[in-house]
Amino acid sequence: MALTVHKYGGTSMGSPERIRSVARRVAKWARAGHQMVVVPSAMSGETNRLLGLAKELSPEHTTPELLREFDMIASTGEQVSSALLAIALQAEGMQAVSYAGWQVKIATDSSFTKARIESIDDARVRADLAAGKVVVITGFQGVDPEGHITTLGRGGSDTSAVAVAAAMKADECLIYTDVDGVYTTDPRIVAEARRLKTISFEEMLEMASLGSKVLQIRSVEFAGKYRVPLRVLSSFTPWDIPIDEEARSGTLITFEEDEKMEQAVVSGIAFNRDEAKISLMGVTDKPGIAFMILGPVAEANIDVDVIIQNVSHDGRTDFSFTVHRNDYARTMDLLKAKVLPVTGATDLIGDAKICKVSIVGIGMRSHVGVASRMFSVLSDEGINIQMITTSEIKTSVVIDEKYMELAVRALHKAFDLEQAAAA
Ligand code: ADP
Ligand code: ASP
Ligand code: MG
């Protein structure tokens, strides 16, 4: 008997009507003989609403004690949607039970608001499945060693679902969302974006890490580590379409590189508006300067993404890096207090109106000139590149936020990613 994990995102769970449709779809799979574990997100908008309430009372939320309370609040969204789904399943005549993360239990570390799953004890879930029940497990949350509720970072229900599928050695994990698969770029930005029938695990990992929110990056990491068969598909197809058809729809994440050999050099374009750029001007150029600047930033648990150090003139150089926008104000304060006085910097400049646009493709490994083509396309559009970073299968540029859509559209067209025109 196949064990299948379904994950439904916020829009898919967005109303009682949508939840009823999810219940009917899940019941269809269960009646066809699948053992079903379902991981829902909170109803759409709910996590934002809950975090908004918390931020009204405390705009600064940097201490572990405050972050703990943020997780207490944010985790309730999934508890509500999971119970609603179990109720809807029972109304469809199924036996169903819902569990919060701590009840399963999904053990995490104690990094509130961005906890990592450490282990999953699936004994209770297995017993329920053996008794013929559909098991609903809250997405996005777990419990730390001291029993505190934790959450896994925004979009974390994807990770919950894949981690559960990995722990239970499920036959497949299906991520149901509001688009019908992974596209060459966000179809909400580029109407001509094309759905990919398959995408390699490595490309999906890059796309997710570079800002394509269709899958949370950690879910892709789990899928890779445990080889979880993973598919992204739509929850907006009629719930009663034949299972065979449904199971072949969407986008399959593949682990076999060879399948992609003949495909495009660039497979997709990702973008990220969540970063901010910080520049220290005129720092003394001497060994250890990068550590002097970024050491305190790392100590404050702030992730740094792109880094660039200019050629020095007269023993001085400019040093720029990007951080998440949520960490921008905190990083600026920290640099002013601890770094500016000791680096000899003449100025500290922050810019939160930037974005990062990336081209991704395993074909870039075997083709030269792809990055320079990207630069020429952006130059033709009059877009200035502020920072560049590359890896074997991606090139990213940091540009002014106001050119983001223009850049994504131009690159999408230049790299032939558009849908074939209708005949
Ligand atoms: P869910 O609530 O189901 O988890 P998300 O909003 O987290 O849904 O993710 C789905 C959204 O991801 C889509 O609505 C789409 O706008 C966005 N997205 C970004 N990049 C891509 C891409 N390359 N392919 C498909 N969707 C993408
Ligand atoms: N509800 C959480 C969020 O909005 C988790 C998720 O949707 O995956 O980020
Ligand atoms: Mg999501």
Image (tube, rainbow, N blue to C red):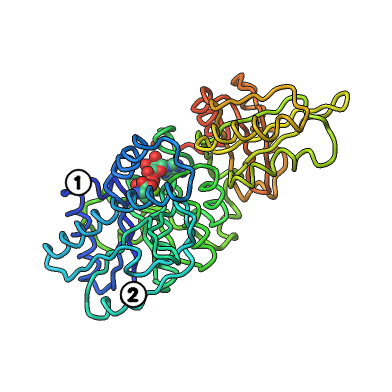
Q: Is any atom of residue 15 visible in this view?
A: yes
Q: Residues within 10 Å of mark 2 (few under 14, many from 20)?
A: few
Q: Nearer the viewer, residue 294 or 168?
A: 294
Up the image or down, 127 lies above or below 71; here it is below
Q: Is residue 377 left or right of residue 119?
A: right
Q: Which residue is mark 2?
A: 2
Up the image or down, 290 lies above or below 94; here it is above
Element type where label 2 sits in the image: loop
Element type where label 1 sits in the image: loop
- Hey, what amino acid is under mark 1? Ser
**Could you tell me which residue is drawn at 69 percent across and 41 percent down?**
294
- The numbered disc on residue 15 is 1
Residue extending furthest toward the right:
314
Q: Nearer the viewer, residue 304 or 403?
A: 304
Up the image or down, 66 lies above or below 252; here it is above
Contact check, label 2 and label 1, Cβ < 8 Å: no
Q: Is any atom of residue 180 visible in this view?
A: no
Q: Residues within 10 Å of mark 1 (few under 14, many from 20)?
A: some
Counting residues from the start of the chain, the first of labels 2 and 1 encountered is: 2
What is the x, y in percent for residue 215? 44, 50
**3D distance between C-alphas at marks 2 and 1:** 29 Å
Up the image or down, 131 lies above or below 420; here it is below
Q: Is residue 181 left or right of residue 337?
A: left
**Could you tell me which residue is drawn at 48 percent across and 46 percent down?**
63
What is the x, y in percent for residue 303? 59, 44
**Could you tell me which residue is drawn at 56 percent across and 28 percent down?**
354
- Hey, what amino acid is under mark 2? Ala
